[in-house]
Image (cartoon, rainbow, N blue to C red):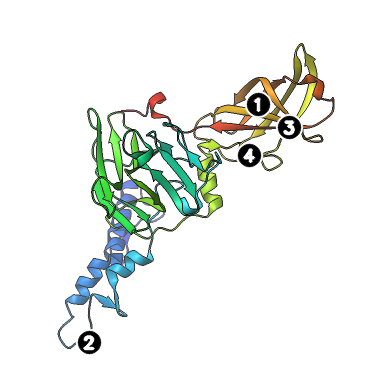
Amino acid sequence: MKYTENYRLLKPDQEDYYNVDDFNDNAEIIDGKMKEALDVGSILEKVKSVDGDGSGLDADLVKGKDVYGWAAGTFSNPNMLINGNFTNAVNQRGKSEYTVQGEYTLDRWRLISDAKALVSPEGLTLDGTSSSLGYARMIQVLEKNIETGAKVTLSWCDEDGVHSATGEVPPKPEEGAVFFATAYGNDGKGAKYARCSLDSKNVMCAEMVCSKKSAYKWIKLEYGETATPFVPRLYAEELALCQRYYLGKIELPHLPPYVMWPYGKKESGYQMHGSAPFPVEMRVPPTISSVTIRSNSHGNVFSAESFKSHVSRRGLGVLYDIVTEDSAEIADGTPYMVSFEADAEIYPETENKGV
């Protein structure tokens, strides 16, 4: 058995017995040394040890910049939230105003109070004054909970600037809910804020709460105790992430144009069948709704009298069997296109997220 020169990492020869513990030990040594080498604080302490008066060196400044501020302002941690850029948000449901308590609004964001949520290029405006509860509340349910004990930072931005708070993920409570990483706006506690929550059913959320009428420009949840800059994803990337949970009813002839060929007649209508792949693998097999059928040649729109669907187990696509109400309008050999909504969003009241 041989060892490396600097850190004495094991270097087994061809004939040596293979032991996975040796490789795990090597990985731990490398991991520790890399952390030590890349840690800004550690580097500064070493520089400070030789930073004397008159040396012309200020260990806290590099090229006139505060190192901690420079590092935080240069690097950005990934955002654990989806569709957090409200000035260019994915809005597959297509409304500019949402008012129904319990409905999903912008993709991945659910309105939990009877308030108005307004969508515009300026951001997502929550109108707490329109609610009988006295506040507007919007949540995003995390598909996978953050591990207990992890340090996280929640930050959000409005016309007053960026607001942030750090917290530690608590254990699941026996009853009710616990809150952490609550970041208040400039109006003080209660008027406008964002926070994280974990309830007794193991549902973890990011929340925005507002008792007045005010806009949120973006929101970010990240690991660590520092609020790093918000860097929005490309819209196409954000859309693909959102489509894992919901496929909106896209106006034809834009994608997805699902071409259906009619065959055979039934007593009160015309029967068609076909199939369509989803653009991404959905979270769970989705619920299909709001089906419409359009003639590719005539532009006529028909409603579905009955719609039977079989969604693949992995949420990759769907097979159809449709009966239309308007048999007189349908001609043999004419292609038809079908559009629909596919919902695989998280509804904690009907799902068991585990204990």
Marks 2/4: CA–CA distance: 64 Å
What kind of element bears circle 1?
strand
How packed mark 2 is, by other alpha carbons closer than 10 Å (few <14, some 14-19, many 20 or more), is: few
Q: Which residue is farthest top? A: 267
Residue at 48 percent of width and 46 percent of height: 119
Label 2 or label 4, whichever lies nearer to me, is 4
- Res 294 label: 3
Report whether residue 101 is seen. yes
If the image is split into quadrants, where does the N terminus sit?
A: bottom left
What kind of element bears circle 2?
loop
Residue at 47 percent of width and 38 percent of height: 98
What kind of element bears circle 3?
strand
313 vs 66, left or right, is: right
Q: Amino acid at mark 2?
A: Gly
Report the residue marked by disc 1: 319
- Res 274 label: none
- Res 56 label: 2
Residue at 62 percent of width and 31 percent of height: 340
Q: Amino acid at mark 3?
A: Arg
Label 4 or label 1, whichever lies nearer to me, is 4
Marks 1/2: CA–CA distance: 73 Å
Q: Along the polypeptide, which appears first: circle 3 or circle 1? A: 3
Q: Which residue is farthest left? A: 53
Q: Amino acid at mark 1?
A: Leu
Q: Along the polypeptide, which appears first: circle 1 or circle 2? A: 2
Marks 3/1: CA–CA distance: 18 Å
| Quadrant in the picture for residue 140 | top left
Q: Along the polypeptide, which appears first: circle 3 or circle 4? A: 4
